[in-house]
Image (cartoon, rainbow, N blue to C red):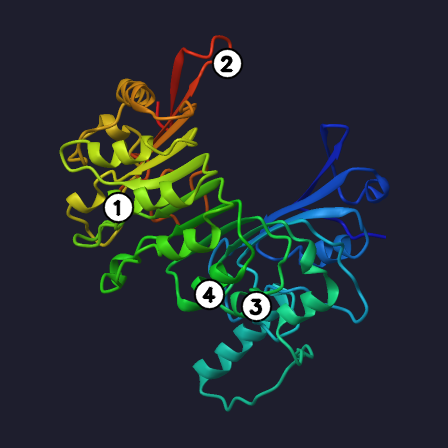
Amino acid sequence: MLPRLLKITCFAYVAGAANVSSISNPSLCTRPGKTAISYRGDGEDLPSIYEALTTCHNITSLELELYSSGCVVGEYPWVFDFKAGDRFPALKRLEVDGYDFESRTKPLRPARKWIEDLFDGVQEFLGWETTTYDVYGLKSYEEPSLEEWRKAMDFTRIEELRLSSIGILFYERMKHELPSLHTLTLESAQLPSEILDFIQNVPPLESLSIHLYAPYPYDEDRNRTQFPLSDIIERHGSELRSLQLHQGESDVPGLRRPMLSTTQIAEMRASCPNLVDLGLDIDRNGTWPVEIFDAIVSIPTLQSLSLILEIGADLHEHDGGLYSYNPEGLDGEGPFREPRMSLSASEALFADLRKRKVGAELQYLNVTVGDYMEIPYSGPLYFPNWEEGRARKFVCAIRSEDGETLRCKKLGGS
């Protein structure tokens, strides 16, 4: 019998309809269609997820996002406790954020680990002699958790993969093990050689999205990453239908993110004959980058465009990196990087790009100003960036009824 699940939702797709059920419902395991597990939490429910994966063999999609909602005392391994002979279903879609593929430690329950660490701390504070021991019988695997995954699951069936905050080992060992992969999303602080090598060795992709985080204020000596566009399109250009390249905005002066040049966009146009969807960071400093726009609209197959603009966080003096949430957004006190985006400005930009577009019509335009978050952080330790509450997103499309009327809407703020 499956244990009680706290934070797992399963989506069973039957005859085109999405029905939401709990995995603890035994009938879900035998339903036709594909089933997904989606989990976001602190790792407490990993035993339940493991039980589901080894019981419901029709599961084809797993979204696993592990995070701490506060301070973590000691080291608690966020990993599955694999049992010899257990098998996972052959997943087609896998999203992993925060799982410790490199851990060799069998998991302890956080409460028990907290007690053990607290006891150690008391001994140290009182000056008592401490000894190395393991009250709860913590054991180690001979191989890292990734190898236990590989014994339990067939990775050759994965078609869609999203990876974030997982260390380097997965990239090193799995670059030749994903023959069915066609959609890849990567989120990372930088692009070390191991990740670049992974990108160059997976099969030619139809969709590639890379999101690099902004440097923290105390990390201001870190160099910004230049996207290796030539290497990307040499490997994947012939198949690429969607390409998203984005770096988070820094509030550290002198660490503005690098932008693609007109020459690079022209290279993309020549080497990506099937490109339909494109997302890029775009620079503006008082005027719109007309040459960049001309290069983009010359891509004949392009139909959907996402532009990510800096809001101007580096234009402000910062006091320790702590700011209050500002709901006024782009209508509030600046300075902001100009030209300032608004609903009317997004409509005018969409109309202008459509007018100048070569080849297929531009059907969609998304303009994001700042690092916009659809769901603001709501945890106990809240240290907002300057741009939080100010960032905005504008979504534009052609009305389907007549195929001509432009419609834009603003997300975020009032």
**Label 2: which residue?**
400
Above-or-below relation of 83 to 385: below
Q: Note whether residue 120 is visible.
A: yes
Residue farthest top in this picture: 402
Real-space CA distance between mark 1 and mark 4, rounded to the nearest whole angstrom: 24 Å
Q: Residue at x 23, y 61 (%)?
A: 220
**Label 3: which residue?**
76
| Residue mark closest to the camera, 3 vs 1 | 1
**Element on which disc 2 rests:** loop
Is mark 1 in CB contact (under 8 Å) with mark 4? no
- Three-letter amino acid code of the residue under disc 2: Ser
Real-space CA distance between mark 2 and mark 4, rounded to the nearest whole angstrom: 42 Å
Crowdedness near tag 1: few (<14), some (14–19) or many (≥20) residues, C-alpha within 10 Å: few
**Label 4: which residue?**
197
Above-or-below relation of 54 to 59: below
| Residue mark closest to the camera, 4 vs 3 | 4
Q: Give the x, y percent position of residue 42.
A: 57, 55
**Element on which disc 4 rests:** helix
State which quarter of the image contains the C terminus: top left
**Label 1: which residue?**
263
Sequence-earlier tag: 2 or 1: 1
- Three-letter amino acid code of the residue under disc 4: Asp
Crowdedness near tag 3: few (<14), some (14–19) or many (≥20) residues, C-alpha within 10 Å: some
- Three-letter amino acid code of the residue under disc 3: Tyr
Sequence-earlier tag: 2 or 4: 4
Crowdedness near tag 4: few (<14), some (14–19) or many (≥20) residues, C-alpha within 10 Å: some
Q: Residue at x 34, y 21 (%)?
A: 354
Crowdedness near tag 2: few (<14), some (14–19) or many (≥20) residues, C-alpha within 10 Å: few
